[in-house]
Image (cartoon, rainbow, N blue to C red):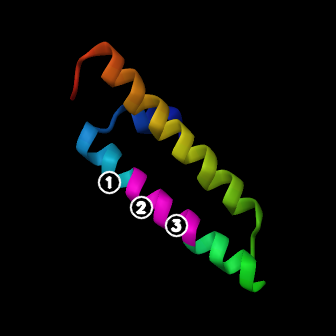
Amino acid sequence: MKAKEIRDRSDDELRKALGDLEEQLFKLRFQKSTGQIENPVKIREVRKDIARVLTVINERQTEGGSR
């Protein structure tokens, strides 16, 4: 997910995306622990996407504006 894509989303869409990403990360970690993960790099990608979403959410909260 690109930073521009994240910034173009509304606050509600960001919260939903954050929930989806956290759920995906949980599933990937579970697959890793059971040895069934096909692409272990995906965990890192999802963690970075979560960080990007949280960064945009925090920026908007400090600005005081919401979309």
Q: Amino acid at mark 1?
A: Lys
Q: Amino acid at mark 3?
A: Gln
Magenta stretch secondary structure, dominant: helix
Point 51% across, 33% down: residue: 3
Q: Using a 10 Å C-alpha cutoff, classify the residue at mark 3 as few (fewer than 14 neighbours), some (14 to 19) or many (20 or more).
A: some
In the rendered structure, the answer to whether residue 30 lies left or right of residue 11 reads right
Look at the picture and state if 64 lies above or below 11. above
Point 56% across, 68% down: residue: 26
Q: How many marks?
A: 3
Asked whether residue 37 appears in the rendered view, the answer is no
Residue 67 coordinates in the image, percent (x, y): 21, 29
Say whether marks 2 and 3 touch (CB < 8 Å): yes
Residue 27 coordinates in the image, percent (x, y): 57, 74
Look at the picture and state if 27 lies above or below 12. below
| Res 24 label | 3
Q: Amino acid at mark 2?
A: Asp
Point 73% across, 75% down: residue: 32
Residue 28 coordinates in the image, percent (x, y): 63, 71
Asked whether residue 24 appears in the rendered view, the answer is yes
Residue 39 coordinates in the image, percent (x, y): 75, 70
| Residue picked out by circle 2 | 20
In the rendered structure, the answer to whether residue 53 lies left or right of residue 11 reads right
| Residue picked out by circle 1 | 16
Q: Using a 10 Å C-alpha cutoff, classify the residue at mark 2 as few (fewer than 14 neighbours), some (14 to 19) or many (20 or more).
A: few
* Span highlighted in magenta in the image: 18-26
Between disc 3 and disc 1, whose residue precedes?
Answer: 1
Let me know if residue 25 is in the magenta part.
yes
Q: Disc 2 and disc 1: Cα gap in Å? A: 6 Å
Q: Disc 2 and disc 3: Cα gap in Å? A: 6 Å
The secondary structure type at the circle numbered 3 is helix
Say whether marks 2 and 1 touch (CB < 8 Å): yes
The secondary structure type at the circle numbered 1 is helix
